[in-house]
Amino acid sequence: MAQHHIDIENVFEGVCGLFPNLKPDEKEKMHRNFSCMHVRKGEIIYREGDKPAGLVCLSRGKVKLYKEGVGGRDQIVRMAKPIGFIGYRALFADENYSATAQALEDSVVCSIDKDVFMDILKNNAELTLHILKSVATELGFSTNRTVTLTQKHIRGRLAESLVFLRDTYGFEDDAKTLKVYLSREDLANLSNMTTSNAIRTLSSFSDEGVIELDGRRIKILDQYKLERISDLG
Amino acid sequence: MAQHHIDIENVFEGVCGLFPNLKPDEKEKMHRNFSCMHVRKGEIIYREGDKPAGLVCLSRGKVKLYKEGVGGRDQIVRMAKPIGFIGYRALFADENYSATAQALEDSVVCSIDKDVFMDILKNNAELTLHILKSVATELGFSTNRTVTLTQKHIRGRLAESLVFLRDTYGFEDDAKTLKVYLSREDLANLSNMTTSNAIRTLSSFSDEGVIELDGRRIKILDQYKLERISDLG
DNA sequence: TTAAAAATATGCTAAATAGCATAAAAAGTT
DNA sequence: AACTTTTTATGCTATTTAGCATATTTTTAA
């Protein structure tokens, strides 16, 4: 796949769009400490245990964040889309990364130097509060996810994942095909089940006319039914 | 149980100890909008779906926070101890409470008016950053918990809960008895299992000499073994 | 104190899910 | 194109866990 040149100014403006409370001098400071790079499909952006060097932003592409689980089984804890940050939790908690970030497709990833960014936060309460709000919202999602992943049955969990992927990445132009192409294994790791069970359950959904499968293409035929399966657990 | 009079000044000072970056005028403002009350064992402090009216602090006692799960099954998502905040996630996310808070024993609970507190945050970046750090840390715990609750087997999950309770509430003077007395049902809801299985597994641990049971008293006899069970999953 | 209710203990059965084996298909590599 | 590797599909079995029934114990209430 061709590696287009990165228009760093454009990318920087996009990233800044995520900060509603940035003063001009802060923006300037960030700009001077802003870097950008391509990552290829499958490439690891950082690993669980690595120390954050900056605030990382996904500008183009898709990234999965996963934790290595108990029996070597991975658990996908987040799916990132552009334009959005990844790895900020570790940065703000002043910890090492608690998950591994891997590109699901060719992507563009940027970084703002850690000290520079934390310095800006230390002097901009509105911005910090804005970020606090997002992190608090995400904590809500995470707690909720703990409950659904532990209490829903396999069909409910997989249906929830499909609904989640729809809400996160949306549809292709046909308004039915999910705009994300995961392996059955990734789908399983997102839904807390074995790959066999993800495959089996997808086939069931397909048999029931809820979805249509074509390799990794997933077309949602009956959203209402899918959401019902998700809600009933 | 006798309801001792609350020494509100003392309690307020205790709560302030959680804010390392509070300026005198901010403290004064908080003090004027600070209230305090007793809650009895079993009482609900707030319910999932309620709107936060302030920043709630547990000053004395113990509180469980739980979400109602899929089949009416509860999932305990946090165990609070004094002195510490509860319900702050919803406050900062500007959402309704995502869990119910219930006193596990007679407790003292305080509250700082929502608008007053958020106003202080808006003007104190250091304080906000401090709180952001705690919330980010907790998000890490939560994500980690998702993985262990979904991937560990029953024995591992229960052992992890016991280790967690030890780390949270500590021991009685004998340095062995957990300083928290939960019903088997609560222990089950903390560990994502049915009550029957919590009872069974506790009995097994007791038979194996890892713990000693006497009603709700749990004495940890072999910490190493318990942690090994937790780690192996 | 006695009665009622709730919590705990234990056994049995059913359901859900994991684990493994094998085969077929798809994707990547030389 | 031929080969290797990976992914997907499907069936079967074993394990884990839930669900229920019943008995016992403990707690609460009258």
Image (spheres, coloured by chain):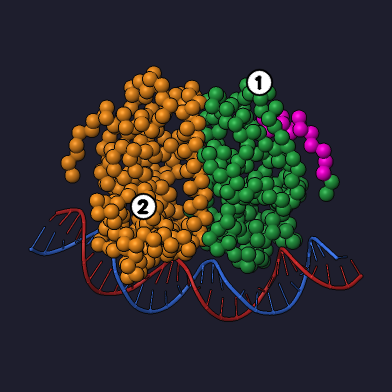
Chain colours: A orange, B green, C red, D blue
Q: Which residues are magenta?
A: B3-17
Q: Compared to B54, does D16 lie above or below?
A: below
- In-front residue for pair A133/C24: A133
Q: Are marks 1 and 2 on the same chain?
A: no
Q: Position of residue A217 (x, y in %)?
A: 26, 58
Q: Amino acid at mark 2?
A: Leu
Quadrant of the image occupied by residue A25:
top left
Circle 1 packing at 10 Å, graded few (<14), some (14-19), many (20+), is: few
Q: Chain of mark 2?
A: A
What amino acid does circle 1 point to?
Pro
Viewport quadrant of the N terminus of chain A = top left
Q: Main secondary structure of the magenta part?
A: helix
Residue nearer the viewer, B207 or C9:
C9
Image quarter of residue D23: bottom right
Residue that appears at 67% across and 63% down: B206
Residue occupying the far top of the picture = A25
Report which residue position mark 1 lands on: B24
> For numbered disc 2, what is the local secondary structure?
helix
The spot of residue B109 in percent (x, y) is 71, 41
